[in-house]
Image (tube, rainbow, N blue to C red):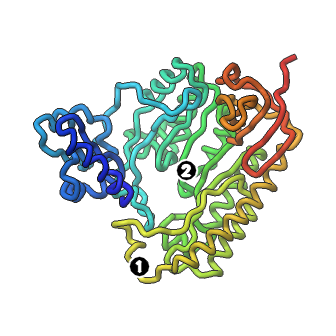
Amino acid sequence: ENKVYSALGSQAKRKRQHMGDLKIIVAGCVAQQEGQQLLRRVPEVDIVMGPQHANRISQLLEQNRDGEQVLATENIYIEEDITVPKRDSDISAWVNVIYGCNEKCTYCVVPNVRGHEQSRLPENIKGEMQMVADLGFKEVTLLGQNVDAYGRDLPGLADDHSGRRAWTFTDLLNHVHDVKGIERIRFATSHPRYFSHRLIKACSELPKMCEFFHIPFQSGDNDILREMKRGYTHQRYRTIIDTIRHFMPDASISGDAIVGFPGETEEQFQRTLQLVRDIGFDRVNTAAYSPRPNTPAAEWENQIADFVKNDRLNRLNAVVNEVAEERAQRFAGRELEVLVEGVNPRNAEQAFGRSRHNKLVYFDGDGDALKGQLVNVKIEEVRAYTLIGEMVKSK
């Protein structure tokens, strides 16, 4: 939030110099969190809107026509957006399947700023996927704060009398898998509490599903996980990974971890290190715990000193990199299917893309000409997070 206020200072100055020619809109999680306070601190701001109001920006601008500040942070039902969203890539598209989050993790601000879970209708998701396929996209990542919760708020029960909801994330994957033009499907982010055997089996059976799973674990200690209100144990997490590797032995696994959570002891931190070693992650996104406004853990008295958090983060990163290097060796000498994304920005004579395992792959070739194509690359050099090889010519 400090960065937002800092950035607003220069924009407010611009507006004062060019009054009437500039609208300042603050949108997203910080806007939701700060709300009315943001309007008071920076009176030059025209509109403050939470994430759930993104599709209403034209209406909000209309309300602001006479210069009156507009605050839109109340929880509402998120309407479908009929416009074509701007995308950072023309190869891989992000498609939202669920908004919000019902979890109550004690360190996380998301439920307070993104509202309750709202699943999009299956046909709307499939329709957007077909739209991006028609625009030439080859890959789709289905996106949500907790994709495994998909369908819990949709009506009806499954016809097989199992007691499941009519729509689960597994049902959605089966529903959208046949979209013509889409070659690959990924999803993020998953929650271990809801990651099911049925979902894993479906991923192994659907050819377009990539062999890559991002499943945050946050800690390897059960007491810390309980204080975080994560709703699972490290044993449960290990079982999920074992099941994935039973059905998809070559799958890449990534996760998230937090060190220095309030009250974390050195012994508990060591259990996180052990989990990373035992699982053999391809990648782990790591962070030192940072108190967030309006979250329970931020108010606890057993905060960990910054120098301890930084030390643990450095030690964790060292183990993460070591394990990733070891895991990457399995790709040496293999041919991998790569979806080409373009020219290597550091070497114009190289193309780059991603394997189905979400590994960055670099190889000699015309990145512009090959962009959007699926090619086979024989891996000759292996690094922790990148692979280098030679494109295999078609016979």
- Judged from the image, the secondary structure of the residue bearing numbered disc 1 is loop
Q: Residue furthest left?
A: 66
Instruction: Looking at the image, tell me whether mark 1 or mark 2 is earlier in sequence order.
Output: 2
The residue lying at 28 percent from left, 58 percent from top is 34
Name the image quarter holding residue 83: top left
Whether tag 1 and tag 2 are in contact, CB under 8 A, the answer is no
The residue lying at 82 percent from left, 36 percent from top is 389
Amino acid type at circle 2 is Ser
Q: Position of residue 391 (x, y in %)?
A: 82, 28
Q: Position of residue 157 (x, y in %)?
A: 44, 40
The residue lying at 68 percent from left, 41 percent from top is 358
> Dividing the image into 4 quarters, which one contains the C terminus?
top right
Task: Say which residue label 1 marks.
Answer: 300
Task: Say which residue label 2 marks.
Answer: 190
Mark 2 residue crowding within 10 angstroms, few (<14) / some (14–19) / many (20+)? many
Amino acid type at circle 1 is Trp
The residue lying at 61 percent from left, 25 percent from top is 138
Q: How far apart in space, not on screen, are marks 1 and 2 (Cα)?
A: 27 Å
Q: Position of residue 151 (x, y in %)?
A: 44, 42
Q: Could you tell me if residue 305 is visible in this image? A: yes
Q: Could you tell me if residue 217 is visible in this image? A: no
Q: Position of residue 265 (x, y in %)?
A: 59, 81
Mark 1 residue crowding within 10 angstroms, few (<14) / some (14–19) / many (20+)? few
Give the answer, above or below, for where 363 lies relative to 370: below
Q: Is residue 361 left or right of residue 257?
A: right
- In this view of the protein, which residue sits in the foreground, 322 or 95? 322
